[in-house]
Amino acid sequence: DWTMGAYREQMVEKIRDEVGDKNVICALSGGVDSSVAAALIHEAIGDQLTCVFVDHGLLRKNEAEEVVGMFRDHMNLQVIHADETELFLGELDGQSDPETKRKIIGKLFIDVFQKYADQIDGAEFLAQGTLYPDVIESVSFSGGPSVTIKSHHNVGGLPEKMGLKLVEPLRELFKDEVRALGRELGLPDSFIGRHPFPGPGLAIRCPGEITRDKLEILREADAIYIDQIRKHGLYDEIWQAFVAILPVRTVGVMGDGRTYDYACALRAVTSVDGMTADYYPFSHEFLGETATRIINEVKGINRCTYDITSKPPGTIEWE
Ligand code: XMP
């Protein structure tokens, strides 16, 4: 892509000019935006960039290993794996209100990031994968005030607090351009084409109280669901797909025994920008086969439902 090739060179120059010989820190999530931003900045300034991967214990199966492995071992970036699972799950213990959960995670994320960033010598810049479209979702009702639906999890306000200058090399780009730039930088397609994953992670896919037990069940079910979607060649047609574990157990029968296990909901939507979405019209065959696999293979789930709510009136995530 000639446009992105030129953009890449231009931005590399610009980042070098801006940063000089100072150090840059970056919160790496493994999402497309922060990944492309990190790769681009690394190309410009090499080891003057250190990435902090905040592991809140709310990631999907194998996710931390995949992200850290790919950036550290494959792309030679300096990555700190900040495993703070105990801290996050401890603070979330017993919390069931969606906004409270989001706020706890958002605050801890900033604390943790700051703690690790403080250990990096002379960092003067914070890199962010901010895109052109706004990161805060607010809906304006005609004539009425602007209403925020969910408090968004990002590192907003952090640069001022830490006295850092911002580097935001993707500010002028839309999502599809970021993907093109990522390909240009040699990021594997498996990263470029990834579905979005929310900052609060599995916490908002586990309505009600979060327990380690539920998280483990959710990870297994989600991995099977995504595997099914890939096997049927549907991954790229879908904006986002995931499992939510419901805060209810239901009665089932397995062999000659009665079971009393969690119910889960499968979610898959098509969307252009996440602001509106339609549920994905899977075939009954796909749904049946997937439910059977999840129930047979995941200990702790005995019932599977498919969420057919579009956005609006639903949101994509369950919390
Ligand atoms: P909702 O659930 O509001 O989600 O329809 C719209 C899109 O945003 C993602 N999402 C988030 N992403 N931090 C993020 O980085 C968040 O706090 C957050 N909440 C929702 C969601 O996965 C979907 O793609």
Image (cartoon, helix red, strand yellow):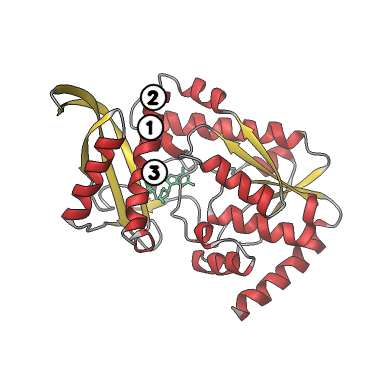
Quarter occupied by residue 270 = bottom left
Helix, strand or loop at label 2? It is helix
Residue depicted at 40% across the width and 41% down the height: 150
3 vs 1, front mark: 3
The type of residue carrying mark 1 is Pro
Relative to 73, residue 168 above or below: below
Which residue extends farthest front?
255
| Residue 183 versus residue 205 in the image, above or below | below
Q: Is residue 255 left or right of residue 155?
A: left
Mark 2 is surrounded, within 10 Å at the Cα level, by few (under 14), some (14 to 19) or many (20 or more) other residues, namely few
Alpha carbon distance from label 2 to label 1 = 19 Å
Q: Is residue 85 above or below residue 63?
A: above
Looking at this view, is 224 or 118 the one in front?
Answer: 224
Q: Read off the residue under disc 2.
A: 213
Quadrant (top left/top right/bottom left/bottom right) for the N terminus: bottom right
In the figure, 54 relative to 195: above or below?
Answer: above
- The image quadrant where one finds the C terminus is top left
Secondary structure found at label 1:
helix
Picture quadrant of residue 160: top right
Q: Which residue is mark 3?
A: 223
Q: Amino acid at mark 3?
A: Ala
Q: Earlier in the sequence, mark 3 or mark 2?
A: 2
Q: Around disc 1, counting alpha carbons within 10 Å, would you say few (fewer than 14), some (14 to 19), or many (20 or more)?
A: some
Q: Which residue is mark 1?
A: 98
